[in-house]
Image (cartoon, grey):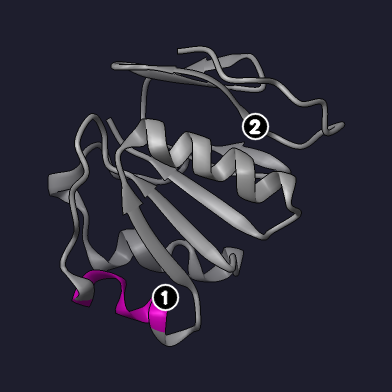
């Protein structure tokens, strides 16, 4: 599905998604990524939902977002709250949704100049 592209200068936005990929500002990704307004990072070392551990969520502490959107693939899944407790203790909201919903929600929040991070799994 193609998403509306709003020119925000260098702001990274999702421009499309499919069952096996997402596109961020026109670039295709078919592996787990982290998307911030200023960058796409592929150094988040989790391949799929079942591999998620505390260390994968601790990765986001240094980024200091207001909210982390976790795109869990084709279906919405919820990790155990103990895995992301360090984020909630730091006042960072964690929202879990399927990947298409995470893409749409990220685009809305980044357009509002919110400090949002999207972590996308396949």
Point 64% across, 14% down: residue: 26
- C-alpha distance separating marks 2 and 1: 23 Å
Magenta run includes residue 62: no
Tell me: residue 102, above or below residue 61. above
Q: Can residue 26 be seen in this view?
A: yes
What number is the disc on residue 87?
Answer: 1
Q: Can residue 42 be seen in this view?
A: no
The x and y percentages for residue 16 are 52, 17
Point 22% across, 44% down: residue: 76
Residue linked to disc 2: 13
Point 37% across, 80% down: residue: 86
Point 21% across, 54% down: residue: 52
Tell me: residue 83, above or below residue 119. below
Q: Residues within 10 Å of mark 1 (few under 14, many from 20)?
A: many
The x and y percentages for residue 87 are 41, 75
Apparent side of residue 97 relative to residue 53 in the rendered image (left or right): right
Q: How crowded is mark 2: few (under 14 residues within 10 Å), some or many (20 or more)?
A: many
Q: What element carries label 1?
A: helix
The x and y percentages for residue 83 are 23, 70
Pick whichever of labels 2 and 1 is earlier in the sequence: 2
Q: Is the magenta stretch mostly helix, strand or loop?
A: helix
Image quadrant where residue 114 sits: bottom right
Tell me: residue 108, above or below residue 68. above
Quadrant of the snapshot with the C terminus? top left
The nearer-to-camera label among 2 and 1 is 2
Apparent side of residue 32 relative to residue 91 in the rendered image (left or right): left
Read off the magenta span.
Answer: 82-88
| Farthest residue, direction left | 50
Quadrant of the snapshot with the N terminus? top left
């Amino acid at each position: 599905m193609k998403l509306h592209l709003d020119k925000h200068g260098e702001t990274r936005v999702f421009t499309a998604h499919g069952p096996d990929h997402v596109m961020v500002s026109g670039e295709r990704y078919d592996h787990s990524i982290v998307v911030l307004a200023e960058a796409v990072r592929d150094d988040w070392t989790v391949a799929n939902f079942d591999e998620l551990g505390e260390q994968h969520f601790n990765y986001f502490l240094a980024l200091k977002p207001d909210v982390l959107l976790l795109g869990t693939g084709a279906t919405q899944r919820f990790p155990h709250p103990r895995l992301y407790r360090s984020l909630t203790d730091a006042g960072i909201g964690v929202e879990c949704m399927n990947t298409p919903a995470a893409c749409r929600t990220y685009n809305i929040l980044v357009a509002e100049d919110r400090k949002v991070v999207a972590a996308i799994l396949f």
